[in-house]
Image: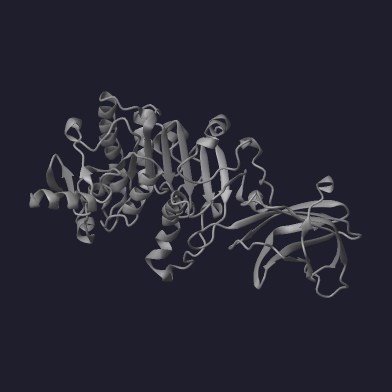
Amino acid sequence: MMRILALQVLCLVGTLMLCRAGQDRECDNFTDLDFHDSFIGTNLYVRLLLYTRANLECGQELSHHRFTAQLLFNLSRSTAFVIHGYRPTGAPPIWIDHLVHLLARQEDMNIVVVDWNRGAANLNYFTAVTNTRRTAANITGFIQRMQEEGASLDSVHLIGVSLGAHVAGFIGAMLGGKVGRITGLDPAGPMFAGVPPEERLDPTDAQLVDVLHTDMDGFGLRGAHGHIDFYANGGSDQPGCPKTIFSGKAYFVCDHQRSVFLYLCALNHTCNLTAYPCSSHTDFLNGQCLQCEAFKPASCPVLGYDLSPWRDNLLKLGQTRAFFSTTSELPYSKTSYRVDIVTWNQYLRWGVVILRLHSGKNVMETRMDNKLYRFEQYTSTRLLAQFDEDLYPIQKISLRIVTGNVIGPRYKLRLLRIRITPLNQPARALMCRYDIVMEENMEVSFRPIPCNESNA
């Protein structure tokens, strides 16, 4: 009796043992190797570790063949496969447990961590690349046996990180592009740049392919490779990551790893990473792509687990590039405003715009200097203003147009209207001000008033 009671308590805690068929069972953990293993090289061996809401703290290694013995694996549920990338040190990925827990929050599903560390842990990157095909074949065989037992490919979601994104693509291709979805987190670039689509992740590998780019000028892959490609801060250099080699390991991996941390943040609903479809990052920063007309009545796409509001339009559009900006640390989200200015100047002026928002004693400033903007008679200028924090309510606005004129007379600029539209909080009121006369290089401050829609 005491043994039964103790076993029941252990089941509730769920941290050390897994209870199955009335007996205790040790947890199956991700393979933990070290630098010595990577140095001498490893031979590929693929393990599949199952997690569900019933055993979140204790993985169960799945048999590749005997489904009947796998009591926690429910073929009627959706199944997410989490596939890691290159592991030069042999250590388990630090993000695995966090991702498993966050996926379990999204829905009651099978979460299968693909442990191919014996194959990815190798100082020779090219060996790991070679092993991606063999890993994909192994997992494809497992999914085919799932199908034979009644599972639907529609319910399969492959989430691949770096090299794991291409493993996911190979699996999808072997299954005829019929798996429900592939999510690629900064697909690896070395050995995959410039190759044909069948040799890397591409949109034909699944019914829906979404890709997040954070290190295209380093370990990530340039270009567009999904039905929707999200580009964080342009897809290359990430805020807060080291800029010089003297920072050590972080200089090499920070941008690349940011894709995982942004995805975790999105799954946790800690950050709202709204992306704006655009032809280029420059056009996005210039405020030319803030409408999301192609996705109405839905809003702009949001990075995360649920892409169902945009799925139909994404499939119709073929390939969509979408851009967003982040801060350097959690919660990563920037607060964005669309700024529309109508000027009536006597003289043509070129300049950049500095905008400050005031809320009590708190002040946030942004400099819109991606290019020189043209201000002349009855010219409408649209800008994107992004801030690291969300100040609310906005009690005062300060504006300065910097033209670089430091020796001549200051020319006046007349603003017929400035309209500031909150993009992250569409329920908030638009802020306007009409007929402002200012001098170049001099700041003018004003209190915003409700917009007169008849003049908007």
User: 330 above or below 151?
Assistant: below
Left or right, 27 with respect to 277, comes to left
Residue 30 visible within the image: no
User: 154 above or below 160?
Assistant: above
Q: Coloured how?
A: one colour
Left or right, 207 with respect to 420, comes to left
Residue 198 visible within the image: yes
Q: Report the residue at 56% width, 39% height from top.
A: 320
Pinpoint residue 101: horizontal percent, then vertical percent.
34, 50
Taking depth in this image into account, of 408 and 449 the one nearest to the observer is: 449
Taking depth in this image into account, of 347 and 181 the one nearest to the observer is: 181
Q: Report the residue at 53% width, 51% height from top.
A: 272
Pinpoint residue 399: horizontal percent, then vertical percent.
76, 65
Pinpoint residue 176: horizontal percent, then vertical percent.
38, 26
Q: Residue 35 falls in which quadrant of the image?
A: bottom left
User: 145 above or below 19?
Assistant: above
Q: Residue 296 falls in which quadrant of the image?
A: top right
Left or right, 212 with respect to 322, comes to left
Taking depth in this image into account, of 40 and 348 the one nearest to the observer is: 348
Q: Residue furthest front?
A: 1
